[in-house]
Image (cartoon, rainbow, N blue to C red):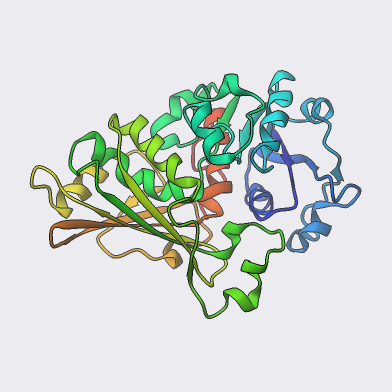
Amino acid sequence: MKIKVGIIGATGYTALEVARLLQSHPNAEIVAATSRAEDGKSLAEIHPSLAGRLDVPIEMLDAQRIAKKCDVVMSCLPHGASAETCKQLVEQGTRVVDFSADFRLSNRELYEKWYGVTHPWPERIGKTVYGLPEFYADAIRDADLVANPGCYPTSVILPLAPLIADGLIEADDIIVDSKSGVSGAGRSAKVATLYCEVNESIAAYGVGAHRHQPEMADLVHRIGGKAISLLFTPHLTPMDRGILSTIYVRPSAKATAADLLKRWESQYADCPFVTPVPHLPSTKHVAGTNYVQMTARDAGGRIVLVCAIDNLAKGASGAAIQNMNVMFGLDQTTGLLQ
């Protein structure tokens, strides 16, 4: 029998990517999709690229009705709105992969400081597994709720966490410079993401105040066992998809770039999607896939780490399906070897 999947908040790019990937998943099928704004239409009407392939009707969200249909729900709702829906679905006995930031951080105070809302299910803050199977597969396997990672944090946590854990780099001097495609800003109309604003341009945003910064620091601390000091600056680039993170670190104990590559090779030897590489990765190398490429270079007194992911795949929807595979006892790569 196939895993019955529902998509909550089906109008955005992450929902489209989930639907696209599940089309080739041999053990899953989409049986429900919801949107307040598009009730009565079909997924193919909202996302024309699905025409003739996926005509699941869009319905209003009713947690009890959706729970009866689905084994697992992908919640693509924004922060704040997602937590309440996740709570209702979990209480109905349906497993959930949550795309929002509502359950990623380790404590309520940190969440409410950065997101400016009162958390509707505070009992689950710090008690919800973070959806990186590379570190948390055992906990994901039995989870009723998984906090799908942020896109930028994925490209930073995977390189940094093993190095912090082994004391190969200094924890108090980390600089992260990340570039993202425009799909990372979502599908809603915004002046800053209009074609004439983005084309032929690159712009920094959220300097010193981006909500993914505390997620990076929190998770590297939790995985690596040591608090870190991290400065993060994201940039919007004129491409559809992809993230390239350039991370500047100071080595400790005379570690070299070659030492860091060996550490990654050991850490991720059994992780099918994380690939330490000798070349400098680019977003083109991983576009449309769930793969992560990363490398290290000696640079004076620092080591420069470079990590490339697809923000819609390993940075969102691909990771969600990888988590779903773990939750239901499937090989992590099922439906994701694109």
Give the residue displayed 63% in from the left and 35% down from the top.
117
> Is 152 placed left or right of 27 in the picture?
left
For the N terminus, the quadrant is: top right
Give the residue displayed 19% in from the left and 46% down from the top.
262
> Is 225 placed left or right of 126 in the picture?
left
Establish if 240 lies above or below 306. below
> Is 63 placed left or right of 17 in the picture?
right
Residue 71 in view here: no
Q: Residue furthest left?
A: 254
Give the residue displayed 66% in from the left and 71% down from the top.
194
Give the residue displayed 29% in from the left and 29% down from the top.
225
Query: x, y (%) of residue 288?
Result: 53, 60
Query: x, y (%) of residue 315?
Result: 51, 50
Residue 280 in view here: yes
- Depth check: 173 or 68 in front? 173
- Depth check: 196 or 76 in front? 196
> Is 27 placed left or right of 271 in the picture?
right
Q: Residue furthest right?
A: 40
Query: x, y (%) of residue 105?
Result: 49, 32
Picture quadrant where residue 145 is located = top right
Establish if 223 lies above or below 297. above
Establish if 257 lies above or below 161. below
Establish if 249 lies above or below 297. above
- Depth check: 240 or 110 in front? 110
Query: x, y (%) of residue 200?
Result: 53, 80
Badge count: 0
Picture quadrant where residue 92 is located = top right
